[in-house]
Image (cartoon, rainbow, N blue to C red):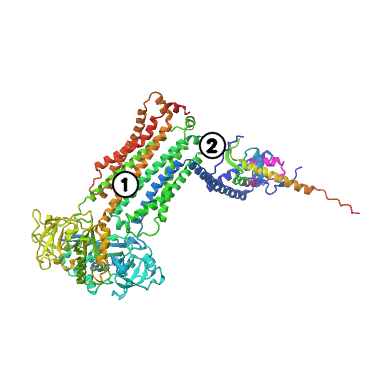
Amino acid sequence: MTRPSLPVVKGMLDPLVLRALSWAPMHGFEITEWIETRSSGTLDLEEAAVYQSLYRLEARKHITAEWGVTANNRRARYYQVTREGREWLRAETRSWLRSAEAVTAVLTEPPLTKAPAAG
Amino acid sequence: MKRPSIRRWISLPLSRAAREREVDAEIALHIALRTQRLVEQGHAMNSAQLEAERRFGGTEARLSLIHHAHDRDTTMTTHEWIENTITDLRFTVRQLLRAPTFTAAAVATIALGVGANATMFGVIDRLLLQPPAHVRAPERVMLPSVTFTSRAQHHTQNVLSFPIFRDLESDSSFLGVAVFSEASLTLGSGQSARELNALRVTPAYFAVLGVRPSAGFFFDPTASSEVPAVPEVVVSEPFWRTTLGASTSAIGQNIELGGRLYRVIGIAPRGFTGTDPSPIDAWIPYAAGATTAEIARWKSERQWYSLQLVARLRDGVTPGAAAATASRAIQAGELRDGDPADRVRKRKSTVTFTSALPRDARGATAASRVTVLLAAMSLFVLLLACANVTNLQLGRAIRRQREVSIRLALGVGRGRLIRLLLTESAVLALLGGLVAMGVAWWGTALMRTTLLAGWGFEGSPINVRMLGYTAAVALGAGLLTGLFPALQSSRPDLITSLRTGGQPAGSRGNLRSWLLVTQSALALVLLIGTGLFARSVKRIESIPLGIDPERVVVATLNTTGRTYDAATLTSMFSALARAASSTPGIERAALTFSLPFGATTADAIYVPGIDTLPLTAEGGPYVNAVGPDYFVTLGTPIIAGRAFTADDREGAAPVAIVNQTAARLWWPGESALGKCVRFDDKTAPCATIIGIAANSRRQSIIEDEFVQVTAPAAQASAWAQPRILLARVRGNPTVAMKQVQRILQTAAPGLPYVSVELLTNRIAVQKKSWRLGATMFGVFGMLAIILAAIGLYGVLAYDVSQRTREIGVRIALGGLPTRISAHIVRQGVSVAGAGCVLGLAAALLFGSRIQPLLFQTSRLDPTVYVCALAVILLTSILASWIPARRAGRVDPAIALQSD
C-alpha cells in the first residue's frame, strides 16, 4: 500500500519550505508536517535539513524569525516569509516548472518511428 | 494556535551559548512533537521517543545546525549593519543639506572649540609631555644646580665650574657626567659669515644622553683630552642637509668655524637638540679654540662659573641620594682645593637635581604655567561650544518632534532612531573635526611664532598625536552633543506632540535653560580670567625698569673658538668704542662688563663696619664695571651724587656707585655718598661711593630688588674688563642696528664677527608669556561670549517663533507689546543672571589656582569682577533684544490665522 518515499531533489528543499511558510507563519515541526502531508508522504524529509534550510533562508533574508508560543504554551521559533522570499519563491517555482516540463517532455516522448525509406 | 505578531526582526549578535540554547530549544520542540505524533500513530512512548531522535539525526545533526545558525547570524549582522549605516549616512547627509544654516553653525562651533583645543594640546605636548628627542631614559638624566650659602653670599646657580664637574665625575652615583655650554659660532668669514648655535661639550656628552649618531661618530671619550690642530665637530641633521648639501662625503670634510678649521666626524640624529628644545647646529669639543693658559685656568678655578653639567644616574640610585653624595663630593673637592675647612662647612654647597624630562625642567616656568592655564581655557571654550551645539540639536529635535512621533507611531524602533540621530551628530563632529584641523594648523603656526619662538620646530604643525587627539575630541564632542538630544527626542510624548504640532515639552525647555546658564557661567569665568590677566600685563608694563631700553643696541664680539689675550680684546673693544663715538647715528656709547637682562656676576664686597652684608633674596652682591657714559647710555638715573667721568681712570682715587637697595640696606638712615667699599678683598683699597644709581633689573622684569656695586672699568679688577658695547642710537632702532653692525665690523682690521641686538628684544622675550596669556585669554574670552550670546539668541528667537500664537492671543487680549518684549528680555537676563551666580561661585572656588600666574593683581580684583558681570549682562540684553522686538511686533490677526 505504501510506496517507498523519495528523497527531495537537491536544491528544492528551500522552495518547499518557503511554500509552506507562504500559507502562514510556522515553526519548524509544523513546516515538516506540512510538507509531508502535502506530498502525501512521497517526499522523505531529512528532518534536520529542514532547519538548515530555515537558517539559510533567514541569512538570505527570505524569511524572518521570532520567538513565540504555541497553542500548548510551548516556546517555538516562528518563521515568516519576507517580500524578497515571496519573489524568490515565485521565480524558483517558474524555473522548476519549466525544467520539470522539459524533463518530463523528454522522458515521455514516444520513440520516433523509423521513417519510410525513400523510394 | 496563537500567532505572535511578527515584527521586523532586528537581530542583535547572539552569544555562542545563547545561540546553542536557541537551536537546542528548536530541536527539543521538534522531537517532542514528533514523539507525540508517533504515539498517536500507535507507537509505545519509549520507542516513539527513540524513533523521533533517530529521525532527527542525533548529535551530528545538532552540531551541523549550530554551525548553520552561526553562519546565519554573522552574515545577517554584518549585512544589516553595513546596510543600515549606508542608509543612515545617506539620510543624514540629505537632512543636513536641507538645513544648511544649522549644519554650518554646528560645524563652525565644533571646529572652533575643537581647533582651539587641539592647538593647545599640540603646545602642551611639545612643551611638557614629549621627552627630549633621542635621549635614552631622560628621567635618569639630571641637570644639577648648586646652592652656595655663606655669610656674604647665598646663591643657587646651574652655571658651574670645571672643578665641580670633576667632583661629580668622581662620584659613583653617576654613570657619566658631561659639560656643556652654549656658544654662538661664526661659520665662514668675511661678508658671507653667519652665526651658528653651537654647544661646547666634553666628549662624554652624547654618551651621557644616550644618543646615537645618524651617521659617522661622536666624540671619543677615551681619546686624549688634548684638542688636535684640526678639532672635530658633530653637526646637526638640518645643518648637514642645508649647509653640507646632504652629501655622504660630508663626514671627514673640513669646515671653517670661528676662524679655524674643524673636521666633521658625525651627524646627530634629526630632531636632537640635547636637553633643551632650542635648536643646535654644531657640537664642538669644550676646549677647542682655548689657549693652554685659559684651559689651565678654568680647569683649576673653582669659581670660574661658565658651564652647565649633565649627569646620568647609575641604576638604582635615586635623585635624592645622588644629590646627597654629590653635595659631599663638592664639599670634599672644596677642601682638597685648599678652601679652609670652616669656610667649606659654613659655605655648605648643596646640589639639587632637575631631570631632563620637560615637566621637571620646564614645568615651573611662567611660559608652561600660562600654557597649562590656556589649555584649561580651551577646554572651557570646547565645553561652551558643545553646549551650543547641544542647544542647536535640541532646537532641531523639537522642530522634528512631529516627524519623530510619526516615525515612532509607524513602528520604527527607538534604538534605530537614536542610532540615526547619533549618526547625524557623528557626521557633524567629523565635519567639525576636519575644519578644526585647519584651525589647529593655523593656531599652531601662530603659537610657533609667538609663545614658542626659538624652539626647534620641524615639519608640519600637525603631527599624528595631534591628529589622534583632534579625532578623539571631535568624536567625543559629537557624542556629548548628540546623545542627550537623541535620547530625548526618541521619547517624545506621542499623543501630545501629534496633537499640538510639536510644542516644546517642559523638561526639554528646562534642559535648554540649564545649558544657557552653564554657558553664561563659563563665559563669566573666562572673562574674569581675561580681566585678571589684562590687569597683570598692565601692571608689568608699568614696572619701572630703571633703564630706558628703547634705542639701545648691545654689541658683542663673537670670539667662540678663537683665541685672543685680554690685552687684544681690550684694544678691540676700545676700537669699537672709538668707532661708536664718532658715528653720527649713535647718540651715546659706553663699554660695560655686564648689563641688565644679561649675565650678572656676584663677588665679595667688604664694607668697613659691617660684619655680614645685608642682602636680598636675589643674592649678591652683584658687581659691575663700566665706562664713563654707561648710566646715561642705558638711561639709568643717578639719584644722588654723580656718574663716572673720564677722570675716574686707573691710578686716580678709587670710586664706586651703589644702587638704591645697597644704599638703603647698608647705610640705613644715612647717606651712602662718601662711604667706603672694598672689592674682592678685605685689604683692597677703599673705593669711595660717589653716586647712587636707580635700581634696575638683574635678569628679569619680575624679581626682587638686589644690591649692586659698580666700579669704573679703568679701576676694576682684571676679570671684570668690559666685553660689551652699549650704543644709544638715533632714529628707528632696527634700521640703525644694521648700520651699527656694519660700522663696528670695520672699526679695526681683523675683528671677529660683531653681534648686535636690541636691548628691548631681551625684555620683550620676558613679557611674551604674559602678553600672550592676556591675548589668548582675550581671544578665548571673546569666543566664549560670542558663543554664549549666539546660544541665548538662538533659544529665545526659537521660543518666540514657537509662541507666536500665544503672544498673538495676549496682544489680542490687550497685552502691551512693550510688556511682552520686556518679558522676553527679562527671561534672557535671568538666565544670564543665574549663570553669573554659578560662574561667580566657580571663580571664587577655583580662582586660587590662577593667583600665582597673576602679577600684583588680586584674583578677587573687584573692578575685573564688576566689568565681567556687566559684559555678560549687557550681552544677554543684546542677545534677547532682537527676539523681544519680534515678539512685540507680533500681529495678532496673522498669528491667530497660522493654524
Which amino acid type corresponds to the residue marked 2 in the rendered image? Gly
Question: Quadrant of residue B214 in the image?
Answer: bottom left
Check residue B549 for magenta coloring.
Answer: no
For the record, the magenta segment spans A29-52
Q: Is residue B368 visible?
A: yes
Mark 1 and mark 2, same subunit?
Answer: yes
Pointer 1 indicates a residue of which chain?
B
**Helix, strand or loop under label 2:** loop
- In this view, the residue farthest toward the bottom is B229
Q: Which residue is mark 2?
A: B411
Q: Quadrant of the N terminus of chain B?
A: top right
Pointer 2 indicates a residue of which chain?
B
Residue B634 location in percent, x, y?
19, 58
**Helix, strand or loop under label 1:** helix
- Asked if residue B531 lies left or right of residue A104, the reply is left
Q: Nearer the viewer, residue B789 or B181?
A: B789
Q: Earlier in the sequence, mark 1 or mark 2?
A: 2
Residue B623 location in percent, x, y?
17, 62
